[in-house]
Image: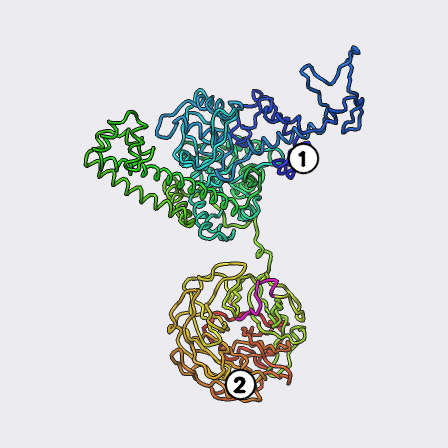
Amino acid sequence: MADDINNHSDNLNNRPGDFNGDDRNARTNDRTNENDRPDNHADDFDTRDDEKVDGDLDDDLDSDRDDDFDDGLDDEDESSNQLTLGGGADLSHTLSDEAGTRITLEDIHGGAIKPTDMSNEMKQSFLEYSMSVIVARALPDVRDGLKPVHRRILYAMNEAGITPNKPHKKSAWTVGEVMGKYHPHGDAAIYDSMVRMAQDFSMRFPLVDGHGNFGSIDGDPPAAMRYTESRLTRGAMELLAGLNEDTVDSQPNYDESLAEPAVLPARFPNLLVNGSSGIAVGMATNVAPHNLREVANAIYLMIDNPDVTTDELMKVLPGPDFPTGGIIMGTDGIRDAYETGRGSITIRSKVHVENVGKGSRQRLVITEIPYQVNKGLLQEKIAQAVNEKKIDGIADMRDESNRKGMRIVIDLKQGAVPQVVLNNLYKRTQLQSNFGVIDIALVDGVPRTLNLREMLHYYIQHQIDVVTRRTKFRLDKAQKRVHILEGLLIAVDNIDEIVHIIRSSRDDAEAKQRMHERFDIDDIQGEAILQMRLRRLTGLARDELASQIEELYQQIAYYQDLLAHEEKILQVIKEELQEIVEKFGDDRRTTISTQEALNLDVEDLIADEDMVVTVTHAGYVKRIPVATYRSQKRGGKGVAGLSLKEDDFVEHLFIASTHDYVLFFTNRGKVYRLKVHELPLGSRTARGSAIVNLLPLVEGECLKAVITTRDFPEDNHLMFATRSGMVKKTAMSAYDRTRHDGIIAINLKNDDELIDVRRVKAGCKVILVSTDGKAIIFDEDQIRAMGRDTTGVRGITLKNDAKVLGMEISNGQGDLFVITEKGYGKRTLISEYPVHNRGGQGVYTIQMTARKGELAGMKVVGPQHELVIVSEEGIVIRVKASDVSRLGRSTQGVKVMNVSDTDRVTAVARMIAKKPTAKKPNNGQAAFDLFALGEKGAAEEEPVDIGDDEQIVADLDDEE
């Protein structure tokens, strides 16, 4: 049906469509006489008032209906005796009544009766009725957030001068004005709509200032319109500002005797601020209200960054802000509504517990209730549930609400648990309710479901149009005015001759003609001169004219510059909205709970465990539990870690928790952010999934470093190192952003590439190792903190074809472990390396020989660490750091891993080994300490704090 309605605006005659029983019932209900309706409409949707039909449809809907159907009659062949209808029946051109009198299909006026199929007639009539309700009555416009009845009420009150600086006026007078001039429907529909705009419990930003009884949150109906008075609020004037400056299009009213605006200028986003609700035919809308300040911040963000994401918008616009307050439970419904235009938001009442007297009795005090909940009916439901024994523990209830605020007191019985009673109230009453968000609004006259970005976009586009048209209007006005003033200035400068021309002319036309011939003054300027008063002839008046002309030229230049630069128009929109926020902005009333009891995140369903993540050269990634690999002694052959394709090899290996953020830094200097649990889980021998399915990497881009973290503190920094020896230090908070296509992490020059990124703290030392076997150590404070998109400074000077192999961060303790491509390695005390200034060449860390190959990996380790070494062919071995010989700085090393002639070491990772413990003996039995009698544990030497936050904690034991 929705497709039928959308296509109806293009071609009503070609409308197929079937309507269900609910639609027919909706039409029948709309035809109910308004006098039979109950007086209390405070809790209904605000458009139900507008949909009270007086029993007949507008005549204009049927004006051209006769021409839309082919009745099968041929004027040139009137002798045909049969007429075939769509239903297959044959109908004679001559009919007979009950008395047998023959009746022809020609009426007395010379026309012809056109028989038609009833099903087609009903279908066409219902479509026309549907479009009338949808477009002209029930749905708001996305630009000003108003439906026609609300827009007409505000416009009529403004035209009548019922403004905030004027006294209140009888509501009956306003209703009559609106009904007689713009809205040809029942007075009750208009009055109920006006009442809702005055209710501070219905509108987040009331548009009508009511004087008298305009209903209550208890469901009390408003007084009759003859008793109440009203006027516009100052906020409503901001919706109407600029109407007299040709900012919006006008349209004729229902009888084409007057004009009314098709939409209001709306200097603030009323659709989001006040929300809207209404029931149309086949669709409904229910837009939640929001806080003016937060919506304005979202618009600023959208203007500055049109590609802003929903998550970024939710940082400044976290969710709806209902006029009755309450607590929103969780953010899943909010996110769904903002991303898809539909969602369900759970709202709880704000309740606290008070102690009664000196005893142990307590009571619940309700100070805020969910939006659109009738307080009177809520108390009735609570009392009914208590009487029916559905809720236990309640002794008494009373309403202590007053002008200062809401206060519903529920006294509990002795020994009753407040939280248990409260949970029952949440379950069985409207103390907790759901607000179903349906963000449907009219866009160019067509109903559309909009997400948050679309609603903000259409409002900004509307404001661009309003400011542009207003600027053109003011520019034209200023140009016309300066044109007249220039003519007056000519007249003042030549007053004697001007007076002579006027006095000697027979009439105005001759005087203007002679002034044109003498001073090139046109007809408009001549008319202004003829109407000029004598007081304008003084010298002071001449200076005033010159000053006005100069000021007008400045305004004209400003208007022309504004029209030429859209970014300046956007700046004007921001400034004007900021003025409104400063006038009318207030604090948020609704609290958004951080408690995820009702809305669990994905991480709540995922175990917090360490994972080994591997990435191959061909671009395959997977994660597997750390316990998959077993520990071996130095020189072991290892186990097969991956089943690789031909010519593929492991290039990256790191360990992180499933709940950590993982920052992927690539060789192109970009960074991507994911959670570890978002990576594909595989078996020990599985190849994994292609990394391009997770990250939008371009050709030639590959991972070079990984940082795991749960937050992004401002006092922590990241240290970057490039292949050419450049280093850079940047605050970690600069990378607390998420973009699908990544963000720039470091600005690389020429053919340089990023090789490593590490966390660094004050007092740490930076270690750089090159492929030619040299290492340099310098203090981190020699590198000043820089911005995210910067290049850095020189860290190490390289010679020949040497490149930087890796970087480590150390506190000066522990050992530097290095390993060559053929599996020869050693560890050397870091204290044996001299500390230099950054930019030096460094010193040798291992004796390089052709048989052992170039350096392939380096890590800073302590006795408590184990090393995971991966070869190009996918062989993985775990070695305790204490099993690797500690040698001098300039030595060749020992065999750490047996590597075949066709294989080579490609990656090294570090982890903390768990100290083995013996089982407790049973009482009365002797026990052997196997670790004391046999081989020594990994933690025989005292653990050493190497000062690196990237240490990986893992349980490495495969068996207990």
Within 10 Å of the Cα at label 1, are there few (<14), some (14-19), or many (20+) other Cα atoms? some
* 910 within the magenta span: no
Instruction: State left or right for residue 795 relative to residue 375.
Output: left
The quarter of the rendered structure image containing the N terminus is top right
In the image, is residue 844 above or below residue 59?
below
Q: What residue is shown at x 65% (from left), y 67% (from top)? A: 688
Q: Tell me where residue 243 appears, x and y as whole percent.
A: 42, 34
Which residue is at 53% across, 77% downward? Answer: 939
The answer to whether residue 229 is above or below residue 632 is above
Q: For mark 2, does the 10 Å Cα neighbourhood hold few (<14), some (14 to 19), or many (20 or more) residues?
A: some
**Mark 2 or 1, which is nearer the eye?**
1
Q: Quadrant of residue 483?
A: top left
Find the magenta span and give its range: 691-706
Q: As shown in the figure, which amino acid type bears the numbered disc 1?
A: Arg
User: How many discs mark residues in the rendered view?
Assistant: 2
Name the one closer to the observer, 719 or 897: 719
Tag 2 and tag 1, C-beta contact below 8 Å: no
**311 to the left or right of 117:** left
Q: Is residue 439 visible?
A: yes
* Sequence-wise first label, 2 or 1: 1
Which residue reaches farthest top? 99
Say which mark, if any, is on residue 885. 2
Q: Position of residue 16 (x, y in %)?
A: 69, 35
Residue type highlighted by circle 2: Ser
Give the CA separation, mark 2 to mark 1: 86 Å
Question: Can see residue 398?
Answer: no
Query: Where in the figure is residue 94, as x and y percent of width and height?
Result: 78, 17
For mark 1, give the secondary structure: loop
As helix, strand or loop, the secondary structure at mark 2 comes to loop
* Rendering quarter of residue 212: top left
Left or right, 136 with respect to 759, comes to right
Residue on which the image places disc 1? 15
